[in-house]
Image (tube, grey):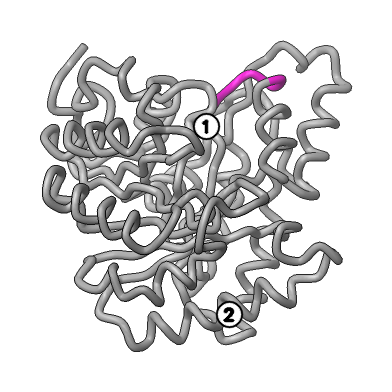
């Protein structure tokens, strides 16, 4: 029987529970400066050592980004700020950002991506150009973006020809770089296209570990809004189908079955390319962190209790 992505909570078989716990081990999560400000102490929510990405939305001052990174680092979390190529004016600006992150917040990791704006603000339009500056030499870890359901900004014709070419370039860079590299993906709602995509990467010689994007618990209307704005592809139909069921319309979405299906596939295929889970806390970081803990995504209790 096919898994229902939106079934109500029920006790999971022991084997499934163990697979989910293993799959969630070492998960990461994403925040923005304005959402981080609402969290009194991250140690009350996240296990120590959780990697926290800091999303850089166009218009966010670098001062706020660096302050958020400094705070998270002080609370015991390795931070990975976004570097969206299309909002960075030039190499001098990039060098300044890196110097501030390193000098003020001890940043050693970065997510390099093109960014969500259609027209570049300056000299850069791709993550490959950022890498080619050489300014990230010495970083311990570099992640790049992945799109299991395609990226129309790169391949407007619906193919993935340009995306795959770019990923092969990044794989070649990874092979000669000392930095640990991985691919952090957009969130999805259907496991089957994700599994097929990861297998296609492997068949194409792309071995970058995949950190699969997972939307945290949230209202259905919230998820549909973000999914449309972020260009989520075929799996958006999962949400639209749920919206047509009035008995489920007001129930919050939780990623239980999406995660369980991927975890089961990983358990049955240990060499499968998904290495970790990356959460987008669209319904709030506390809600997401609570769900992760309840489903085994922790390595002990948080250091500070509410």
Q: Quadrant of residue 226?
A: top right
Residue beneath disc 2: 202
Q: Residue at x 61, y 50 (%)?
A: 261
- Label 2 SS: helix
Residue that badge 1 annotates: 216
Residue 197 placement (x, y as % from top left) = 67, 67
Q: CA distance from mark 2 to mark 1?
A: 27 Å
**Residue in front for this viewpoint, 223 or 162:** 162
Residue 305: % across, % down: 17, 16
Q: Is residue 267 visible?
A: no
| Image position of 121 with respect to 253: above or below | below
Most common SS among magenta residues: loop
CB under 8 Å between discs 2 and 1:
no
The picture quadrant where one finds residue 251 is top right
Question: In the rendering, at what x and y percent does residue 275 appear?
Answer: 42, 62
Q: Nearer the viewer, residue 83 or 294?
A: 83
Q: Which residues are magenta?
A: 217-221
Sooner in the amino-acid sequence: mark 2 or mark 1: 2
Residue 276 pos. (x, y %): 42, 56
Quadrant that contains the C terminus: top left
- Picture quarter containing residue 7? top right
Circle 1: element type: loop
């Amino acid at each position: 029987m096919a898994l229902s992505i939106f079934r109500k909570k029920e006790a999971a078989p022991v084997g499934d529970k163990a697979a989910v716990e293993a799959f969630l081990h070492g998960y990461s999560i994403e925040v923005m400066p304005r959402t981080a400000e609402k969290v009194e102490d991250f140690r009350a929510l996240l296990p120590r050592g959780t990697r926290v990405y800091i999303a850089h939305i166009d218009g966010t001052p670098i001062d706020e980004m660096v302050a958020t990174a400094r705070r998270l680092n002080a609370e015991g979390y390795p931070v990975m700020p976004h570097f969206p190529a299309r909002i960075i004016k030039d190499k001098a600006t990039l060098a300044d950002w890196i110097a501030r992150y390193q000098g003020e917040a001890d940043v050693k990791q970065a997510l390099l991506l093109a960014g969500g704006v259609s027209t570049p603000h300056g000299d850069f339009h791709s993550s490959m150009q950022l890498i080619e500056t050489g300014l990230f030499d010495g970083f311990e870890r570099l992640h790049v973006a992945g799109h299991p359901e395609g990226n129309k900004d790169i391949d407007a014709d619906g193919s993935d020809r340009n995306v795959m070419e770019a990923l092969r370039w990044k794989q070649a860079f990874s092979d000669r770089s000392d930095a640990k590299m991985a691919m952090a993906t957009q969130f999805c709602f259907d496991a089957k296209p994700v599994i097929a995509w990861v297998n296609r990467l492997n068949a194409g010689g792309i071995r970058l570990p995949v950190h699969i994007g997972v939307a945290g618990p949230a209202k259905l209307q919230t998820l549909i809004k973000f999914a449309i704005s972020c260009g989520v592809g075929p799996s958006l139909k999962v949400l639209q189908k749920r919206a047509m069921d009035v008995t489920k319309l007001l129930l919050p979405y939780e990623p239980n079955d999406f995660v369980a299906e991927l975890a089961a596939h990983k358990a049955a295929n240990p060499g499968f390319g998904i290495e970790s889970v990356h959460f987008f806390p669209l319904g709030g970081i506390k809600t997401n962190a609570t769900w992760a803990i309840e489903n085994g995504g922790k390595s002990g209790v948080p250091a500070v209790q509410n």
